[in-house]
Image (tube, coloured by chain):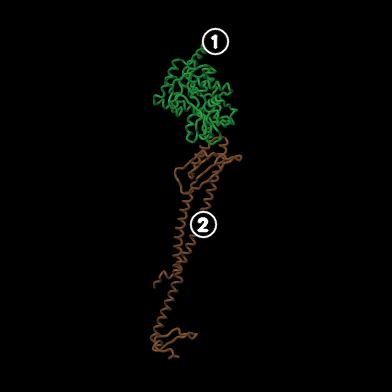
Chain colours: A green, B brown
Amino acid sequence: MRYLFSIIIFLALLCTWTTVDAHDFLTLGIHPYLPATELVDRFTPLADYLSRKTGKRIVIEIAKDYKDHIDKIGNNKLDIAFMGPVSYVSLVEKYGKKPILARLEIKGKPTFRGAIITAKNSGIKKLADLKKKRFAFVDPESTMGHLVPRYMLLEAGVDAKDLAVYKFLYNHHNVALSVLAGDFDAGAVKEDVFYEYEKRGLRVIEWTPSLSEHNFVASSMLPGETFKVLQGALLQLKYNKEGKAILLKMQGNLTGMVSASDSDYNNLRIILRRLKKAGIQP
Amino acid sequence: MIVPVFGYRRAIISFAAILLIFLGIIVAVILAHEREMFDAARAEAEGEMELMGAFVQDAILRHDYSAVEQFLTHWGIDHKEIIELKATAPNNFVISQYKRAEPSKYIFPFKKAIRYAGNNLVTLEMARDFSSIRNSLNRFILRLIAGSVLFMGLLGTALWYSLKKLALIPMEREIAIRREAEKKFRTLMESAPDAMIFVNGDGNIVLVNKQAEKGSVNHFV
């Protein structure tokens, strides 16, 4: 009996020790938008920086897919998660609000937009003119290459069945070039791709609304003090040389991180709800 | 005794003519070779167009225009003899255009329409630099002509000396001896006190001396 009691005590101590160890590091989850090795390479300087700021080791975890990523942060199995805007809205929809640490600022802007484009010499003036026309999307899950433009078409009274044909070309550049080459009458691309091809003969039929950029959210279980340290560290990145190098490594056009609130994603939320109603889900 | 070179003008002209004919044959052979080289280079370029066409056709059927852009640009960069490589859509939109910085004087254009199921997908145009072939042929022609002239010069000189030693010198010696004999005979004839008239077998006078010139022909008849 005395031995049994000792074993129970030992196991209890072991559990306590394991729990303490679990609090010695933080997990940074990233959705798999690039190959895992590439993501680890890009985010390691940021993880090292946050590790120094918090005094805790930061472990990078790449999710196997977007759903897995949403579920992990939704269930607080990650301490920090890098989220795409659509993933963030889906997360809140499914698991409720999570505290936002910061959102990305690309070329000085914390929002991004896309455009529904056509060739300069086409007769299409407004979205309603796209009925019976050929349309090129990027990818069913692409925010600016499908979801938002699809919402805009719906709002303009153009359903997919009203189009002569529509295809997913899985690349923003292919959409721009296919429209220019005359394979499609119109297409949907992100803003920087439109500007890249504008001089070669593209024009905008309508810009998409500006949506809030990618963000970092924290687990609801993260202690308030750690949250504050992490948020401060992220927001300070653009003000020092080391931070700028970290941002550059993460993404070439990333200029900083700014604070964000859940309401910044309201317009996207409305768009996704409208799409859901029409049976279109990311 | 000095024999003037002009005395052998015919031999020199003949020799020069042979040299020219020889050089003409060389140039003709080189030109034929040049045509073969250009034909081979053209066939190679057309083969490249076929290869590019196969890739481009597949990519355009998938609307993968960015792959076409990348592929043609890399192809142009990797092949230094390509001056320009262009892909144009049926609506005249230039999908991709690669241009080399350095120009060339020897440009050969190639054009190929890529079609599928009766539809024109894209037109590929390539300008290829053939100056490397032209330059190498020019260098080859110059070397060959220089070598031929040198060879013919040496051969001519050797032949000239051989001919001179074996035939011309003995002949000239013989002519000189005969001229000397004729001169002696004429001196003897002119110094003779009697009139002398030489008549050939037909009865025609062929030679008279001064004494004979002084007298009347009738006087002798």
**Viewer-nearest residue: A93 or B122:** B122
Numbered disc 1: what chain? Answer: A
Q: Secondary structure at mark 2?
A: helix
Q: Secondary structure at mark 1?
A: helix
**Viewer-nearest residue: A156 or B49:** A156
Using the rendered image of the protein, determine whether residue A224 is visible from the camera's viewpoint. yes
Numbered disc 2: what chain? Answer: B
**Viewer-nearest residue: B37 or A116:** A116
Could you say where residue A76 lies in the image, as x and y percent from the top left? 51, 17
Callout 1 amino acid: Leu
Instruction: Decide if residue A75 is on the left or right side of residue B3.
Output: right
Q: Residue at x 46, y 71 (%)?
A: B167
**Which mark identifies residue B48?**
none
Seen from this angle, which residue lies furthest right?
Answer: B117
**Viewer-nearest residue: A23 or B61:** B61
Callout 2 amino acid: Val
Seen from this angle, which residue lies furthest top?
Answer: A1
Q: State the separation of the CA atoms marked 1 and 2.
A: 106 Å
Could you say where residue A47 lies in the image, as x and y percent from the top left? 45, 23
Q: Residue at x 40, y 83 (%)?
A: B186
Quarter containing the C terminus of chain A: top right
Could you say where residue B26 lies in the image, as x and y percent from the top left? 50, 58
**Which mark identifies residue B29?**
2
Q: Which residue is mark 1?
A: A4
Closer to the eye: label 1 or 2 = 2
Residue A63 vs B108, above or below: the answer is above
